[in-house]
Image (tube, rainbow, N blue to C red):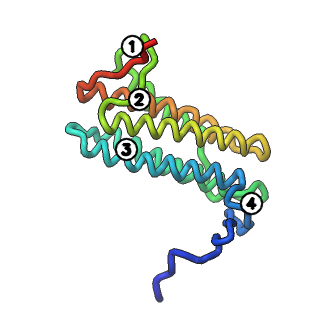
Amino acid sequence: MGKCKIYTGGGDKGHTSLVGGKRVSKTDLRVEAYGCIDELNANLGLLLANIHEQQNPCRELKDQLVWIENKLFCIGCALATPADCKCPVTIQQDCNATIEGYIDAIDLQLPALNSFVLPGGTVAAAQAGVARSVCRRAEREILRLNSVEPVDSAILVFMNRLSDYLFVLSRLLNVVTGTPELFWNK
């Protein structure tokens, strides 16, 4: 059996297939939403690489990020599935409890906040800030889709929690390396 080609030419005129085969414009709300999820996942991959390069990489944080990447792949699949098709994967409500547990555990390791934190510090912390902003954009795209076609509420909650996770993670990545946080100067 021969190897399949990576390109098909099917999207050359600006259309792509959703789960189930329905063809839509590459500017369709669904495509925009799962495209942001793909971009977020790529940023998380870069964040993982940067954490690996950091002097004291934490296996637990890496495991958390890989878990999140897998959940985002499920979300992307769900967003690529039109309402009239059955999605092969779902996000369970317990995923939101898991990510809230991650946030709480990280937050216990952080100093109290008295000001807004600016993105920056270590490369990994700054990359977590980029991922957080991409996550917020993905959340907005999903909400835009939800205004036209219902999106599973567990996905909406997960995306909101994920941006909170990435915020506390960025702070932690500075704290564990002794890198001073940057605070907003009014």
**Mark 1–mark 2 distance (CA, rounded to whole Å):** 17 Å
Where disc 1 sits, the SS reads: loop
Disc 2: which residue: 119
Q: Nearer the viewer, mark 2 or mark 4?
A: 2
Q: Is residue 166 left or right of residue 81?
A: left
Q: Nearer the viewer, mark 3 or mark 2?
A: 2
**Mark 4–mark 1 distance (CA, rounded to whole Å):** 46 Å
Mark 4 packing: few (<14 Cα in 10 Å), some, or many (20+)?
some
Residue at 34% across, 28% down: 172
Q: Which label number is shown at residue 112?
A: 1
Check contact, mark 1 vs mark 2: CB within 8 A.
no
Q: Is residue 30 left or right of residue 172?
A: right
N-term-proximal mark, 1 vs 3:
3
Q: Which label number is shown at residue 62?
A: none
Mark 1 packing: few (<14 Cα in 10 Å), some, or many (20+)?
few
Residue at 57% across, 36% down: 136
Disc 3: which residue: 47
Q: Nearer the viewer, mark 3 or mark 4?
A: 3
The one nearer the camera, 86 or 16, is 16
Check contact, mark 3 vs mark 4: CB within 8 A.
no
